[in-house]
Amino acid sequence: MNDRWKEAFDEIHAESELKEKTKAYLAGQIRCRRRRMAAMGRRIAAAACLAFILLAGGSWLYLTPTVYIAVDVNPSLELGINRFDRVVSVEAYNEDGQALASSLQIRFMNYQDALEEILNEESIEILLSEDGVLSLTVTGDGGAQNDEVLAGVESCAAGHQNVHCHSGSSAEREEALEAGLSLGKYRAYCILHELDPTVTPDDVRDLSMREIADRIEALGGQDIEWEGHGHGHGHEQEH
Amino acid sequence: MRSEEEANRAVERYADTVRRICMVHLKNYADTEDIFQTVFLKYVLYPGAFDSEEHEKAWIIRVTINACRDMLRSFFRSRTVPLEDCEGQARREKEDYSEVVEAVQSLPSKYRDVVYLYYYEGYGAAEIGDILHKNTNTIYTLLARARKLLKEKLEEVDEIE
């Protein structure tokens, strides 16, 4: 490089004032942007928390059953219904119930549609036509949804023979769960147990409702409530 | 984003280079201040890493040249006259730099960067092509034309060559 060029441009330097002014400007920009980034980070974190809370809360609201419908023939099932009248859980209480549950795709279906699916299932239709008895027991916390679901269940049952609807309390359902039975069958078991204290929940778990009713009758017990109702529907509110 | 310490280090290291490029292109001090702020803020915000000091310096030079060009092209600038030009009192660029600098300043803008980078910074034509995003042959052509113009402006042109 030619010395003359070097000398000429070497004369040019950034003024101290210019450098200090630039440094001050950059310091201000860096602090301001860091504050903005921190504020943005806080906003993003808050939004993420809110989204998580909404998602978790929404999932909880949607996936938590508020009403249960126990379905007892021989297959014993319990459907958990959420506050939006959708089936969110299907619990089987015996082997037949397990087989029935796995043959149905009723999760997230409206409970009335789900019940129609169950009642129209071939094995259920055969049982009912052969004088089998199907018990539908609605339990919940006794709110308005309880009554609405019971009315909906009764409306489904109205088109079928030997289907009986009841309502029960949450406490009674808890007792049934402890015994490992669905509520409809637990009620029948309680009647039978009064007549024959040697009977255990295991003895009735795989019996059909008709078989339990026949044993009650053989022991001289009263007809349990569905007897003589045909395709009617008995109500037995217990709280 | 780079730290305040990194920003200060860059200002100390490259302020003279940026100032010289501003001198080649700009006529008033206020514009130079704007260019300083623009170039070093871009440096602070640049997310990439530099392979070496040479790489960093070349990046600063390219950004400064682009910032000067943008300023000269800007709508506002093309339609306004700086206040200091009107009042004749404000600070102006020194006019007592050597005739070499003045000769470079008098060249058409497309030749100024090439001449500065070649003669003062000592870059080769290929490196200048990389910095200015131009073909190497174009750089040679620009250099040849700039030399011819400088010959007319400088008496001792043989020394330049």
Image: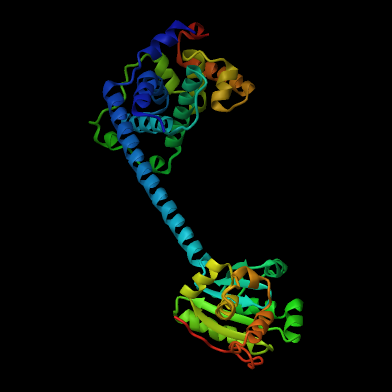
Quarter containing the N terminus of chain B: top left
Q: How many numbered dots are placed on residues in this image?
A: 0
Camera-side residue: B101 or A99?
A: A99
Farthest left residue in view: B89
Q: How is the image coloured?
A: rainbow
> As drawn, is A130 to the left or to the right of A56?
right
- For the residue pair A85 and A159, the one nearer the viewer reads as A159
The foreground one among B84 and A74 is: A74
B88 or A7, nearer to the observer: A7
Residue found at x 64% / y 21%: B137
Q: Quadrant of residue B42?
A: top left
Q: Examine the rendering and report whether any part of residue A236 can be seen.
A: yes
Give left or right: position of A157 versus A239: right
Residue B15 position by quadrant: top left
Residue A156 % position (x, y)? 63, 85
Name the quadrant containing residue B104.
Answer: top left
Residue B108 seen:
no
User: Where is residue A159 drawn, in percent x and y?
Assistant: 67, 89
x and y percent of residue A83 in the render?
A: 50, 73
Give above or below for B152 relative to A114. above
Q: Position of residue A14 (x, y in %)?
A: 33, 21
The residue at 66%/85% (across/down) is A218
Position of residue A54 relative to residue A213, above or below, is above
